[in-house]
Image (spheres, grey):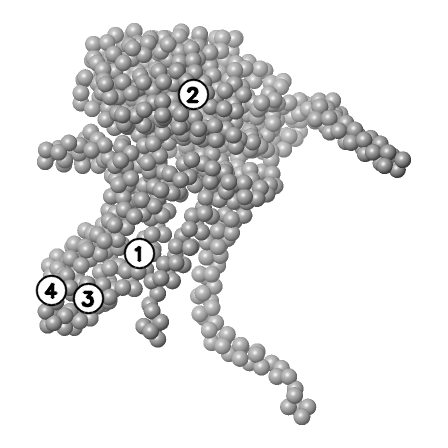
Amino acid sequence: MAVATRPPRGRPQRRWGPAFRRNLTAYGFLSGALICFAFFSWYPMLRGFVLSLQHNNFVDPPEWVGLDNYRTVLADPVFQTAWVNTLVYTLLALLCGYVVPFVVALVLNELRHARGYLRFVVYLPVMLPPAVAVLLFKWFYDPGPGLFNQVLGLVGLPGLSWLDSSSTALISLVLVSTWMNLGTGTLIYLAALQSVPGELYEAAELDGAGFFRRIWHVTVPQTRLILLVMLLLQVIATMQVFIEPYLLTGGGPEDATMSVVYLMYQYAFVYDDFGAGSALGVMLMLVLMVFSAAYLRFSRDDPQERS
Amino acid sequence: MRSRQAAALLTVAALALSGSACGVKSSKKDDPAVSGAAAAAAEPLDPNTKVTISVGCQPPKTAKEFRADWDADVQAFQAKYPNITIDSKDAFPCIVPETFQAKLAGGQMEDVYYVYYTDAQSIIANKQAADITDYAAGVQNVKDVNPLFLQTLKDAEGRLYGLPRKAYTMGLVYNRKLFSAAGLNPDSPPNTWAEVRDAAKKISALGDGVVGYGEYSAANTGGWHFTSLLYGQGGSVTSADGKTAAFNSPEARTVLQNLKDMRWADDSMGTKQGHRWEDLMRLLGSGKLGMMVGAPDVVTEAFNNFGAKSDDLGTTSLPEAKSSLLGGDGYMINPKASPDQIKAAILWLSFHELTVGEGQFNHARNKASGRPVGIPENILWGDNASGTKEKELRQQYATVPPGNFAAYEQGSATIPPKTEPPQAQAVYAVLDTVMSAVLTREDADIDDLLAEAEKKVNAILARTK
């Protein structure tokens, strides 16, 4: 009896030990990633949150100021402008940057000749450093000798102000961004398209489906997962637009290209107010987290499909 | 009775507390500890004390001659003060806003670091610079500097937090070659804005991408130049106490209307706008810009880094100016520096930046290195003995025609300098939008723009601690 009621000493160890040893290599690989994430993602996020509650001159001990930094940012008249600009930019960038690479990938997938060459050409802009690509467009947009106005002039159209007008500046940034990121999107979609079994298209053709119906009923459902993930990633990336306004417009004209991240940069590095900059960063992070969670919740397969 | 006693005790305690509070507030000078510290600060550095200071803004390796001159100066200084070691920190540009706070946070900031005047007040407000008032009080080279140029480096109570390297007031930089090509007399530059408009029209009529008059409107430079133009008209960006915006004024309307007319009625400012600092420098360097607001140091910069021919450029004083924006740069000292390091830093700055004939004012060496000499780009001294001596040396070793800058030197001497507004960078960012609106929108309503900007600037000033 006494033997029977004896607590099973060492039992968990016996279970844990072999399992741990068996997965030791995996834990080794995982620890590298975890350490990198901890140092370069999680700690900065935590530090950003702490900074958003402090006044810190990096010389004296930081002063806790509660939600003062958040109040400062919310009271800034440019705050609302920056959010509206960012949302409009995201919408436009999705219209161009989400649809165009998918269409280009469809076309490339259908081609029988010069496929390698065309894929190289489409991917080429990605190989340029972003700063170089953006500055290249700065020359293209020049209202005098710039390429775009020269082309418009050749076909008898008047030149545009591109970056110099508050009505065209934001869309000009979208064009740069679309051009820069076209290659990556196209490559991912192309890989997804090539994983679609050819028999499905053959069956659809036998059923009398034309080109567009094949895309709608075969391609889109088969690549749905990739499309959904890409949409989420693109929203997260475009909401953080910075380099284009930083290099091309300085947020102008008349704050027409002031984005949330550019405003954050101004707070931190121009006004030397890291607290307010961090507060804005925390707000953006929360918005993106809520959006991502909602998106994942609503884009999830229905329970029947899951089972 | 008990309550009366308690009230009496409370009153005595309150009086004692208020007395001690007053004592703390008013006795900084009288406090033996404080005055003792001031006296210690005024003492010269003990020659037996070994001190090392890191100093920023050493020219980069790519600028071989500038770097060799710097290193030679360091050697000469260390020979004079064998107990001090200068640890030069290579940097180009001398200040990178993105790394400033990070360097402070990570303890990597130099003991002696470079600053623009524009940033000095926010650095002082953030307590990121050491108070050097007592250390610099007895230094003759500092006493020689025109007190107006130390103003930017002081707080509201007159305490000093840095030493200047360069000081200038705004004028009008112009391309003499384009003036001649447009049939204008380069020896008689514009004195009024009506003359500027007229000259800009004639110069832009030359075609081939030539811009008559260029102006900034992005990356805070638009607000900076708006301030220059506004000061010239006699206006102010903020009230005297710095607590409210004061630019919604007739002077600002005159400035903006003039720019609007040049941009849209005369079409003499080019179609491309949104210029930031380097854009106009490039235009000036390529010989395509007729005129811009700027100090004579713009000519040196355009020559050193943007391929300009210094003989082609000239500077005159700001047209019709009632006052002129004071600009420049200097050095501040890390608040974590020890008293001995501060003493060593002041000795170095006095030697390298504030001694006529030495360091940056070694005009004989500048001429030998092929740099433009003769440009009145640094008016630190004013008219005192040091200023006169510097001017003599500058003319003695001149490599550019001094006549190209005579109008600036004569005219600007009578125009009072005016310091930048509080929260300068944040205010300039708001004023950028006003400038960019006028230069990019023909239907821009100046009254609306000023009213909107006034609200924004008042909000910035209201939250200033």
Q: Amino acid at mark 1?
A: Leu
Q: Callout 4: few (<14), some (14-19), or many (20+) C-alpha neighbours within 10 Å?
A: few
Residue tagged 1:
A231
Q: Amino acid at mark 2?
A: Phe
Residue B352, x across and y down, in percent? 51, 22
| Front tag of 4 and 1 | 4
Q: Quadrant of residue A210?
A: bottom left
Q: CA distance from mark 3 to mark 4?
A: 10 Å
* Residue A210 numbered mark, or none: 4
Question: Would you say A268 lies left or right of B35 here?
Answer: left
Chain to which mark 4 belongs? A
Q: Do the numbered discs 2 and 1 sit on residues whose CB atoms are within 8 Å?
A: no
Mark 4 and mark 1, same subunit?
yes
Mark 2 and mark 4, same subunit?
no
* Residue found 52% across the figure and 37% down from its top: B109
Residue tagged 3:
A217
Q: Earlier in the sequence, mark 4 or mark 1?
A: 4
Q: Is residue B207 visible?
A: yes
Q: Nearer the viewer, residue B303 or B445?
A: B445
* Residue A211 numbered mark, or none: none
Q: Earlier in the sequence, mark 3 or mark 4?
A: 4
Q: Quadrant of the C terminus of chain B?
A: top right
Q: CA distance from mark 4 to mark 1?
A: 26 Å
Question: Would you say B178 lies left or right of A233 here?
Answer: left
Local SS, label 2: loop
* Residue B247 numbered mark, or none: 2
What is the residue that sits farthest to the right in this orientation?
A: B1
Mark 3 and mark 4, same subunit?
yes
